[in-house]
Image (cartoon, rainbow, N blue to C red):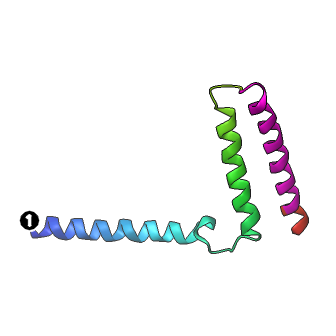
Amino acid sequence: MKRMVLSFVAGTIFTVAVMLLFNLASPASGAMPQRYPELHGALRHLEQARDNLTNAAHDFHGHRAKALEHTSKAIDEVNKAIEMGD
């Protein structure tokens, strides 16, 4: 029984260590700060809005399509702003 508990604890510690190692090596962990965080945040929101508009159940008399068009243009502009800033 004692051996089984020690094996479980050792396995758990190893698993946590591996997870921490991969998390620290991940670029999303914040190891490299993202430039222009406001633009990237806006881009994420615009992409979410685009997805919501795309999946909307109704056309709303053409307004959904027009909003989708403007949102796609806004995504393009934010991407250009990020590129020009670098």
Q: Residue at image x 74%, y 32%?
A: 64
Q: Amino acid at mark 1?
A: Met
Q: Tell whether 86 sits left or right of 68.
A: right
71 within the magenta span: yes
User: Quick check: 31 above or below 74?
Assistant: below
- Residue 19 percent across, percent down from the top left: 44, 66
Determine crowd level at label 1: few under 14, some 14-19, many 20+ residues with C-alpha closer than 10 A.
few
Examine the residues drawn in magenta and state their main secondary structure. Answer: helix
Please tell me whether mark 1 sits on a helix, a strand or a loop.
Answer: loop
Q: Which residues are magenta?
A: 60-81
- The quarter of the picture where the C terminus appears is bottom right
Residue at which label 1 appears: 1
Residue lying furthest front in this view? 61
Tell me the quarter of the picture where residue 8 sits. bottom left
Residue lying furthest right in this view? 84
Q: Residue at image x 63%, y 66%?
A: 27
Q: Tell whether 36 sits left or right of 1.
A: right
Tell me the quarter of the picture where residue 16 sits. bottom left
- Residue 77 percent across, percent down from the top left: 87, 53
Using the image as rendered, state which of residue 70 and residue 72 is in the foreground: 70
- Residue 15 percent across, percent down from the top left: 37, 65
79 within the magenta span: yes
- The quarter of the picture where the N terminus appears is bottom left
Q: Residue at image x 69%, y 36%?
A: 53
